[in-house]
Amino acid sequence: MDFTPYLTTLEGGSLEGALLSVAVKGRVAIAMKGRFLLRAICESVHDRSRIGCAVTREETCLDYLAEAGQEPWELLICTDHLESGTGFELARKGKALWPDLKVVVLALGDVIPAEYADASWLEAVVAEADVVADQRPLQAALLAVMGHHSYRSPSLRGGTLPYLSCPRLTPREYQVLDRLACGLSDREIARELMVSEATARTYTKRLLQTLGVNNRLQAVLKGMRCGMVQI
């Protein structure tokens, strides 16, 4: 999926506050597994005009990175698993094309494969489990790489995953979670469930409360970890 031409249609954010709070002078590439993660991360970049690539496949992202332009590619944000290819290989190949490219990988598998563990080009990796517990590790990783530092989230440093509590959802909460995982907005959820947009927002807020999370990104990631939903 290539979401790049549709970035202007984004409505709001799936995180509390901007994910990337520091100025980026070059272009930003985002490669995520599934529409939801792709949309969530794109919405959370304050200056979306910096995003020059928003895709779900390794090869499509590399095609964008191979393009020559007036502005260099400065930042790559990707997941380890993609719809085609892997984020780790995308990062390796991206750094070969743009040696100054800064890389942040969201590890949905909560691990760094042994062959990449000591790679000098792998600057920042955040375990999915740490984002479920608190969105700040992802923000911290971005601040670190933009300041030319490396970063590993707490689970990757300590080797222990945080405790996971999986609550019981109502049928309606499952319906909302499924649609969030598909990358639908409140307006689109309202249309599918045949309710008002205000009611859809209320459903989403109740879901976040039940899951004990702060935002939609955490809700979907926790749902994935609890086996409630897939992306």
Image: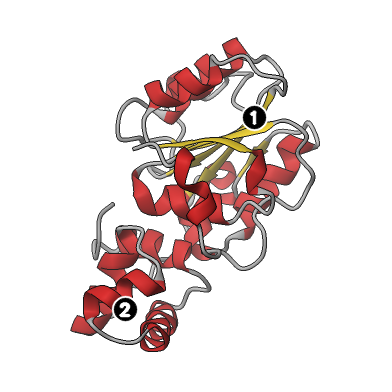
Residue 230: image location, x then y, percent: 25, 55
Q: Residues within 10 Å of mark 1 (few under 14, many from 20)?
A: many
Which of the two residues, 14 or 7, is positioned nearer the viewer here? 7
- Closer to viewer: mark 1 or mark 2: 2
Q: Are marks 1 and 2 in contact (CB under 8 Å)?
A: no
Q: Residues within 10 Å of mark 2 (few under 14, many from 20)?
A: some
How far, Cα to Cα, is label 1 from label 2? Answer: 40 Å
Q: Which residue is found at the position 32% from the left and 60% from the top?
A: 181
Compared across the picture, whether 131 is left or right of 169 comes to: right
Q: Name above or below for residue 185 compared with residue 58.
A: below
Compared across the picture, whether 106 is left or right of 101 comes to: left
Q: Name above or below for residue 34 compared with residue 169.
A: above
Residue 204 picture quarter: bottom left
Q: Name above or below for residue 187 compared with residue 119.
A: below
The residue type indicated by label 1 comes to Glu
Which of the two residues, 55 or 116, is positioned nearer the viewer here? 55
Compared across the picture, whether 164 is left or right of 27 comes to: left
Q: Secondary structure at mark 2?
A: helix
The colour scheme used here is secondary structure
Q: Secondary structure at mark 1?
A: loop
- Tell me the quadrant of the picture where the N terminus can be found: top left
The residue type indicated by label 2 comes to Ala
Residue 28: image location, x then y, percent: 62, 35
Q: Earlier in the sequence, mark 1 or mark 2?
A: 1
User: Label 2: which residue?
Assistant: 190
User: Label 1: which residue?
Assistant: 123
Q: Which residue is found at the position 45% from the left and 67% from the top?
A: 216
Residue 105: image location, x then y, percent: 53, 37
Q: Which residue is found at the position 79% from the left and 44% from the top?
A: 23
Residue 107 picture quarter: top left
Residue 21: image location, x then y, percent: 74, 53
- The outermost residue toward the top is 96
